[in-house]
Image (cartoon, rainbow, N blue to C red):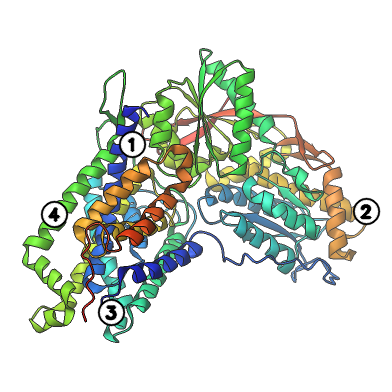
Amino acid sequence: MDITLVLQQLLNGLSIGSVYAIFALGYTLVYSILGIINLAHGAIFTLGAYFTYALMGGNFGFSGLLANAVLPVKLPFAISLILSSILAGLVGIIMERIAFKPLRRKGSDPLLTVVSSLGVAVVIVNLIQYLVGAESYTFPADTFGNLPAAINFGTVEKPIPIRSVQLVIFAVSLVIVLMMSYFINSTKYGKAMQAIAEDQVTASLLGINTDKFIIITFFISSLLAGLAGSLVASSVSIAGPYFGIGFGLRGLAVIVLGGLGSIPGAVLGGLVIGVIEALVPSEYSGYKDGVAFGILFIMLLVRPQGLLGKKFIQKV
Amino acid sequence: MKRPAALTTAFLSVCTLLLTACSGSDTGTNANNTPSSTTSENTTKTTSGAIPIGVAFAQTSNVALLGQEGAAGAKIAEKYFNDKGGVNGTPIKLIFQDTSGDEAGAINAFQTLINKDKVVGIIGPTLSQQAFSTGPVAERAKVPVVAASNTAAGIPELGDYISRVSAPAFKVAPNSVKAALKQNPQIKKVAFFYAQNDAFNKSETEIFQKTVKEQGLEIVTVQKFQTTDTDFQSQATNAINLKPDLAIVSGLAADGGNLVRQLRELGYKGLIIGGNGLNSSNVLSVCKALCDGVIIAQAYSPEHSNEINKFFRQAYLDQYKKEPPQFTAQAFTAVQVYVEALKALDNKSKVNKLQLPQLRTELNKQILAGKYDTPLGEISFTPIGEVVQKDFYVAQIKTDKDGNNGKFTFIK
């Protein structure tokens, strides 16, 4: 295989993988603090993309309750991205209060929380369709200002063009991952969250307000989901309210590969799956999902704690 | 509460499967319901006295981008024909069922229309891929189907009750290749892209490839993708490296639009031909200014100057403020075929006196026998249900600089 093509797919894979990484970060955060898998993560991802589109002054089409709606503002991409991620974070908090807290109060099985999150996902996605219809939306062409459409990493004879939007995504993801690592490892809040992850009861006995930190966790997790959604949508457009479902499933594979509950694991898992998917030859593009889950199953057989997860020691 | 990761994840996999089942497609009743063919039916009418005609288009999922255009045409037709008295005084009523984007949803929609809504005939489904599944269902139930947007080879051959007003790809597609050669006579190398999971696109790309070979051009590559793909980096770069002068894309609106956009972003400067799946202004919202210049063959022109097209075009312009697209015109035509066939049948033997199974069979015969002056021009059917149409056109997408407005401009 031509070396330039391989290089190109590698770079492409790193870019896609970095989106998976942000997405999986949010997933794994909630899992590590609360032990639950939030299946509504994919729906918040979709919501984030729609928020960004609206904030950038996008018009909505003629189906749905809000036919032809458009916000009276037209913010640049960077600001829309931040605002929509914050909005997504707030939706995450609302979701936590309505769908998860009552179950936690009653001490229910985490299984029920997962089912509840599935319900939230379906509600959000269908609400989006009801409000704005199922059409595709693309961000305005000047999303990234004067950046050229693609940057050539090779030479003139053997060009390796990579779309600029992929590079932007990779750069943003890197920054987010570094910020999150710093937050978790070096700030008081981060350490409090680690304490809750280890043992909720003891942490609250030691004076940590677990409820407050659970809210913070959901806020950050949903913010990351919304961010990932907006980034993906800037690259491949919003295909409709269901475009986040595939990511939700991929995210599961990523966090298991990286290690349930491990933050660097989520990042590594995302990049690995992104690169492997990009290296699948194009005529088998329909099997990309199969590849991701195939890796997942092999991982479970060979090393169930994932690449960077801690081995579970059965205590007697 | 430390469960072994394997157990948790096994459980999660089950949830994943549930999620996939819930996402996208319709209600999920994929059971093989045998249609109750002989319900004792004394009346063909709905409780309001109107004649029910079923419309099975995609109103959800990505395919809704194409289905919505069809639905618009059907609704305009319903109002037009009812305002003119319907079928000799009896109005028609269009009953819409959503097929969603896959075969299961389409079969479900057809079963509901046939058995619950007791329609006299069906218009649809949106995709040829769906039609290969629904055709046998309608055929077994002896319900006429007039397809308004299926252009793959083999559709009318699905049965005696299956016909279409959407001219097949092998009639329409070659015109765009000829138009591209007119715009750039130096074209030598052609790259193909097609969606391998869709029957229509597989069929259409073969026709394009045959036409290209007949014109003496060289096929440098044939790249495959799925209609659900969003990232086309590898297909696009594989092709661009071979320096083609012309790219021919056979996909649907969302994937086709993304592919066009990514081809342009990665530096492809040659002409692009889009297939019938990209023949929708919904593709404009995906590739925006980068759609400019895409050539797509058309089975309909808003400028066609017969009475009914003048009315239809004006009605569409009044409501949507832009020219009517091909899918809308074809859906309108399908309704027109039903109304005129019902009128002709009613003149021979009153339709409200016929039992439903007999009505459906007689209606089917009448549809195939008729000649119709429609927005698509004068059409009729071959004995197996293929449409006979004379006029075809070619359009090119023209967008303004920021890509927010675009339209299909007809080229000579």
Task: Compare residues B310 and B300 and report the one nearer the observer.
Answer: B300
Question: Do the residues at pointers 2 and 1 share their chain?
Answer: no
- Chain for disc number 2: B
Q: Which mark is residue A101?
A: 3
Q: Determine the CA span between mark 3 and mark 2.
A: 69 Å
Left or right of B318 on screen, residue A69: left
Outermost residue, right direction?
A: B348
Task: Compare residues B248 and A31 and report the one nearer the observer.
Answer: A31
Please identify the quarter of the rendering in which residue A120 is found: bottom left
Q: Secondary structure at mark 1?
A: helix
**Quadrant in which the C terminus of chain B is drawn:** top right
Q: Determine the CA span between mark 4 and mark 1.
A: 27 Å
Disc 1 residue type?
Gln
- Chain for disc number 1: A
Outermost residue, bottom direction?
A: A106
**Quadrant in which the N terminus of chain B is drawn:** bottom left
Q: Which mark's residue is nearer the viewer, 4 or 2?
A: 4
Q: Determine the CA span between mark 4 and mark 3.
A: 28 Å
Q: Position of residue A41 (x, y in %)?
A: 33, 63
Residue placed under numbered mark 2 in the picture: B348
Question: Do the residues at pointers 4 and 2 share their chain?
Answer: no
- State whether residue B54 is above or below residue A160: below
Question: Do the residues at pointers 4 and 1 share their chain?
Answer: yes
- Residue A310 visible here: yes
- Chain for disc number 3: A
Residue placed under numbered mark 4 in the picture: A179
Q: Position of residue B3 (x, y in %)?
A: 29, 75
